[in-house]
Image (cartoon, rainbow, N blue to C red):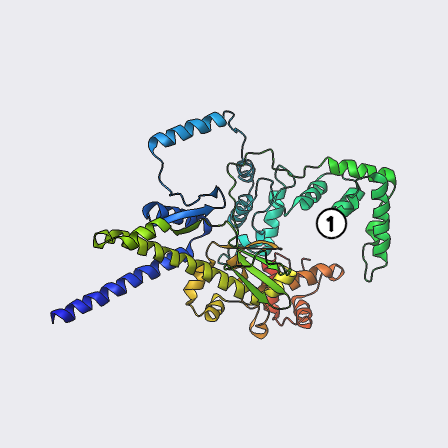
């Protein structure tokens, strides 16, 4: 009986240890890069069997131990830092400057939330960090793509001009449109034709702009005749346009403090396979579809941690009196195992996302296909909550920008069109309305029929729902 009781205790103890490891693995999986970095350093400080081999943000560690600084060391460091920073940055941060203006505006609760998210999503130049569409909360029905566009315009009206944009080219265009003295030729060049400024000589700019319009007139279904017909292609007009463009600020937020700016780093990157092996390795995957894609974990997003070679050797050579050393080694190995599990799960899940959402990676936003977290879970052979933890607070970088991984999970547009996502249906609906300006009173039924001709079968009531989400008025009000 005593032997049986001891055997039962051993089994119970083993089950408890496995359960703790699973809990740790799931906890590590749910952490974003910043929180996981903190957890890695904390584990390395507490466990002598672990060392930080390298941290891409601060350089190579060369296997040195990570320790908590003493009070005297912290004091000396602070004094040295104070000496280096004798001239403190007393400027207002961009976020503080914008929020002071935003708080004076009369906004709805949903507008206030989105405008604040947009403001805190700006980097030191005033450009978007994350793609704005990824800031929408799918659980809040008030936060629609149409409301997002309206909020972007509201933030762009704040000082400084030219913020809340994707890049420098869009910033210059926004600034130019907000000024009453903008020459028509300058607006024409800034609207996606910056190549006309190379070289920045008035005679060359005038010549290239004239040649551009002549070549566009020969294209099928060209609709820019009025715009080109009203332009002055003289050298004097080109000189005025060039002088105006030079008066704009390419980085409108650079005169503000950056102390309040928070950056988000990508966890996973997706690139079209160019045939090079630059990103090949253990933490990369190749996905084949219409094109070949390389999916890889972002370099230097996490510090590299490993077992201490010296500690492992001492633990192997130690006698029975050195069991605590071997226990620390086992804990270190278990921690490294959970890290590998986390990285492997994120990589495998994102590779499946790229495989399924290839239309998005080919053509950009508005081309998502229906995808549930459960679909990825079935492909990976894991529970649905595992995929939910994997997607939590993690980001994917591709040529279209930086997106939350949760952005790629979207519902179907309707029962009759399960192969088309709501994202795709709303994008097509917006294109239809914008391309039929002359027929702006098209009813919801006519819009539904036009969508059906494009392979998207949704009812009239669904069209009305999507139109409201896009904040587009009914045909009567249009």
In the displayed structure, 350 sits above or below 119; it is below
Q: SS of the residue at dot 1?
A: loop
Q: Position of residue 7 (x, y in %)?
A: 19, 69
Classify mark 1: residues with Cα within 10 Å, few (<14), some (14-19) or many (20+).
few
**Residue 19 falls in which quadrant of the image?**
bottom left
Q: Position of residue 361 (x, y in %)?
A: 61, 61
Which residue is located at x 57 percent, y 72 percent?
Answer: 418
Question: 205 or 327, which lies in front?
Answer: 327
Answer with left or right where residue 10 lies relative to residue 389: left
Question: 26 or 76, which lies in front?
Answer: 76
Q: Position of residue 275 (x, y in %)?
A: 64, 61
Answer with left or right where residue 34 lies relative to residue 136: left
Which residue is located at x 19 percent, y 65 percent?
Answer: 9
Picture quarter with the N terminus: bottom left
In the displayed structure, 191 sits above or below 291; it is above
Residue that lies at the very extreme toward the left in this rendered image:
1
Residue 378 visible at all? yes
**Residue 390 falls in which quadrant of the image?**
bottom left
Residue that lies at the very extreme toward the bottom in this rendered image:
416
Answer with left or right where residue 99 lies relative to residue 304: right
Q: Position of residue 272 (x, y in %)?
A: 62, 60
Residue located beneath label 1 in the image: 192
Residue 308 visible at all? no
Which residue is located at x 48 percent, y 70 percent?
Answer: 379
């Amino acid at each position: 009986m005593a032997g049986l009781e001891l055997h039962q205790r051993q089994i119970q103890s083993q089950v408890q240890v496995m359960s703790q490891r699973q809990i740790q693995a799931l906890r590590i999986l749910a952490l974003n890069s910043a929180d996981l970095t903190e957890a890695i350093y904390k584990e390395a400080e507490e466990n002598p069997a672990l060392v930080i081999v390298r941290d891409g943000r601060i350089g190579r560690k060369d296997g040195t131990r990570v320790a908590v600084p003493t009070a005297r060391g912290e004091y000396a460091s602070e004094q040295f830092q104070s000496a280096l920073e004798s001239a403190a940055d007393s400027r207002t941060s961009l976020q503080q400057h914008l929020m002071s203006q935003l708080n004076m505006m009369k906004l709805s609760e949903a507008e206030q939330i989105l405008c604040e998210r947009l403001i805190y999503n700006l980097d030191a130049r005033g450009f978007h960090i994350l793609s704005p569409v990824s800031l929408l909360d799918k659980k809040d029905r008030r936060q629609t793509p149409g409301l997002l566009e309206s909020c972007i315009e509201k933030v762009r009206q704040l000082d400084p001009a030219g913020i809340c944009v994707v890049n420098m080219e869009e910033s210059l265009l926004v600034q130019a449109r907000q000024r009453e003295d903008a020459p028509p030729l300058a607006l024409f060049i800034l609207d996606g034709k910056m190549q006309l400024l190379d070289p920045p000589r008035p005679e060359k700019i005038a010549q290239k702009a004239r040649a551009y319009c002549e070549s566009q007139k020969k294209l099928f279904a060209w609709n820019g005749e009025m715009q080109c017909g009203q332009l002055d292609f003289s050298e004097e007009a080109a000189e005025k346009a060039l002088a105006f463009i030079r008066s704009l600020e390419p980085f409108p937020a650079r005169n503000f403090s950056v102390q309040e700016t928070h950056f988000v780093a990508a966890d996973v990157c997706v690139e079209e396979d160019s045939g090079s092996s630059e990103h090949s390795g253990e933490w990369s995957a190749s996905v084949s579809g219409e094109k070949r894609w390389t999916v890889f974990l972002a370099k230097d997003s996490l510090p590299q941690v490993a077992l201490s070679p010296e500690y492992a050797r001492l633990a192997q050579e130690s006698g029975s009196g050195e069991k605590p050393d071997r226990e620390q080694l086992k804990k270190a190995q278990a921690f490294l195992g959970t890290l590998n599990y986390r990285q492997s799960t994120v990589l495998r899940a994102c590779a499946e996302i790229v495989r399924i959402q290839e239309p998005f990676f080919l053509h950009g936003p508005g081309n998502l296909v229906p995808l549930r977290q459960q679909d990825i879970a079935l492909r990976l052979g894991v529970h649905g909550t595992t995929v939910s933890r994997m997607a939590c607070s993690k980001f994917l970088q591709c040529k279209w920008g930086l997106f939350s991984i949760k952005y790629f999970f979207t519902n179907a547009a309707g029962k009759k069109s399960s192969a088309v996502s709501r994202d795709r249906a709303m994008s097509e609906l917006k294109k239809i309305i914008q391309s039929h300006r002359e027929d702006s009173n098209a009813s919801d039924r006519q819009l539904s029929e036009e969508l059906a001709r494009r392979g998207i079968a949704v009812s009239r009531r669904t069209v009305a729902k999507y139109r409201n989400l896009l904040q587009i008025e009914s045909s009567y009000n249009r």
